[in-house]
Amino acid sequence: MAEISAKLVMTLREKTNAGMMECKKALTEAAGDLEKAETILRKSGTIKAEKKADRQTKEGIIASYIHMAGRIGVLIEVNCETDFVARNENFQALVKDISLHIAASNPRFLQREDIPADLIAKEREIGAELVKGKPANIVDKIVDGKMEKFYADNCLLEQAFIKDPDLTIANLLKGKITELGENLVVRRFVRYAVGEDLS
């Protein structure tokens, strides 16, 4: 299998405005062929969803989900463009699914941009310590891989959806954007668990 370079991923991203992970996945599937990768993104609806990403989302709902007989609770705000979509059963089912996912998966952040720089530095340091003694170029690749795993474990949008592990929450949203024809954004969430450490 051909190795997909960061430059090739950036080229596809600039051409389609799709996310980095979607571009890399499409290029891998297309064995590095840029045109085939673009076609894969078009067929998946990713490009259509990315074009809506700049639209204003001033409507939406705040929802709650209580799990395990009141032992875990989630509050979430998901925004859309119009009140019409906010009242749509399909949109409300999406919000409920994401709330259920948060209750089960306990993400610490919405997206990687929300993670404090000192925590990222600490995680990179821990990753580098675990592979101490290996050549520098290998260490960097291993640490980068460990960081991707850290993001996938801790960032809601990068987590595998509990009802369909082949789908990330970001891709679940993109599918609904294509389906509903409006930009959708998880704005914020909070998860509470009885007896959790508050420090």
Image: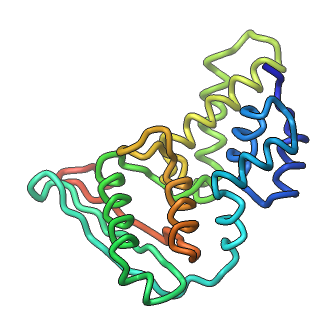
- In depth, the one of 32 and 67 nearer the eye is 32
- Tell me residue 197's x, y (percent): 28, 49
- Tell me residue 110's x, y (percent): 51, 59
Q: Residue at x 63, y 36 (%)?
A: 147
Task: Point out the residue furthest to the left here.
Answer: 69
Please, is residue 80 above or below residue 67 in the view?
A: below
- In depth, the one of 108 and 195 nearer the eye is 108
- Tell me residue 176's x, y (percent): 50, 64
Colour scheme in use: rainbow
Callout count: 0
Task: Point out the residue furthest to the top here.
Answer: 133
- Residue 29: image quadrant is top right
Please, is residue 157 above or below residue 55 in the view?
A: above
Quarter of the image where the N terminus is located: top right
- Tell me residue 128's x, y (percent): 68, 24
Q: Residue at x 38, y 59 (%)?
A: 98
Q: Residue at x 56, y 82 (%)?
A: 57
Left or right side of 187 for 117: right
Q: Residue at x 74, y 56 (%)?
A: 18
- In depth, the one of 129 and 171 nearer the eye is 171
Left or right side of 134 for 65: left
